[in-house]
Amino acid sequence: MLILAIESSCDDTAAAVLEPERRIRSSVVSSQNEIHARFGGIVPELASRRHIEMIRPVVDEALAQASVDLDDIDLIAATQGPGLVGSLLVGFTFAKALALVRNLPCVGVDHMAGHLLSCLLEDPQPAFPYTALIVSGGNTSLFAVDDPLTFTRLGRTRDDAAGEAFDKVAKLLGLGYPGGPVISRLAAEGDPMAISFPRARLGPDSLDFSFSGLKTSVAAHIDSCRRQDAGPDVADVCASFQEAVIDVLADKTLAAAERTGHRRVVMGGGVAANPRLRTVLAERCAEGGFEMFMPAPALCTDNAAMIGLAGYYRFLGGHLAEADADAYSRSPLN
Ligand code: KG4
């Protein structure tokens, strides 16, 4: 069985071909970073227009790299939500139309389910159940994952997602978009203890997150440096901000794993590509006696391979998308 998967929930147009149970035959991602960079964030209308231009070439490229054509495909999977509806509609409608004319089954996939299962594309893969931290530009949430179709949310951000905080702090520092990769690069040259930014715990038992106060505190620090004509030490701001985000992510992930009683911890989403977060969480899990699983950075950021895997499990569960199924902006999982 071969699955053609499509992902267009935000600003990346992605397609993949995979064999069920993990073997990725191809995974193609067309980034829109250069289109949105000058705005310091994603412009939804520009994103959907670019998806329309790119969807066909990206799907063709994924088929070509896998050395297959549409006749070889048995199942089509596409992200149905959550995300920008204009973006989602391009990929999801393309998938449904293709399935209709080729008489193939089609499944709609929740983007969060893709991130929650992406570590299953790697070796070794975690057994179920596990506790998962999903940390991206649109989401920061903790889940208990009992099987490939059963996810229970344990906590989520009450305001900004962690990746959004990275992007907004980068904008304040004039570092461009997306902020995560450049901040993590500069942070490596700075002192994480230089500035004491706040960590929002939200109460002793809370598994929720909040990053908007941290972002405001960084903005106030930058303003105050600029008023003194000194300008901020960019590397120190990056390192101290990043450390504040990571402290909270690691503490709450470990607390969630203690609460579920799971021995396995998993991470996914674009911010999971952050090298310092990967190191800290791996160390904290080892200290706590948890097994840690994280996908390679290319499978942390948005990709269609994870959508194909989650789609395969939905197909096995009998969840096919009707031709009139609609995209959705908010995840029922979240
Ligand atoms: O999962 P993703 O590709 O898209 C969604 O948001 O769904 O994640 C993109 C986010 C952006 O906010 C970006 O700044 C962040 O992931 N990101 C990082 C790193 N690489 C990407 N954040 C921190 N450190 C990184 N190395």
Image (cartoon, helix red, strand yellow):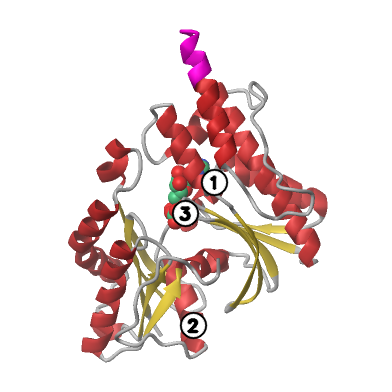
Of the numbered discs 2 and 1, the one sitting upstream in the chain is: 1
**Marks 3 and 1 in Cβ contact (< 8 Å):** no
Q: Does any atom of ligand 1 lie closer than 8 Å to the CB of label 2?
A: no
Which percent across, then down, holds residue 65? 29, 66
Q: Does any atom of ligand 1 lie closer than 8 Å to the CB of label 1?
A: yes
Which percent across, then down, holds residue 67? 28, 72
| Residue 71 horizontal side relative to residue 16, left or right | left
> What kind of residue is marked 2?
Arg
For mark 1, what is the residue?
A: 162
For mark 2, what is the residue?
A: 314
Of the numbered discs 2 and 3, the one sitting upstream in the chain is: 3
What range of the chain is rendered magenta?
Answer: 223-232
Numbered badge on residue 138: 3
> What kind of residue is marked 1?
Ala
Q: Does any atom of ligand 1 lie closer than 8 Å to the CB of label 3?
A: yes
Task: In this rendered view, identify the residue nearer to me: 124 or 32.
Answer: 32
* Mark-to-mark CA distance, 2 and 1: 28 Å
Q: Is residue 86 above or below residue 316?
A: above
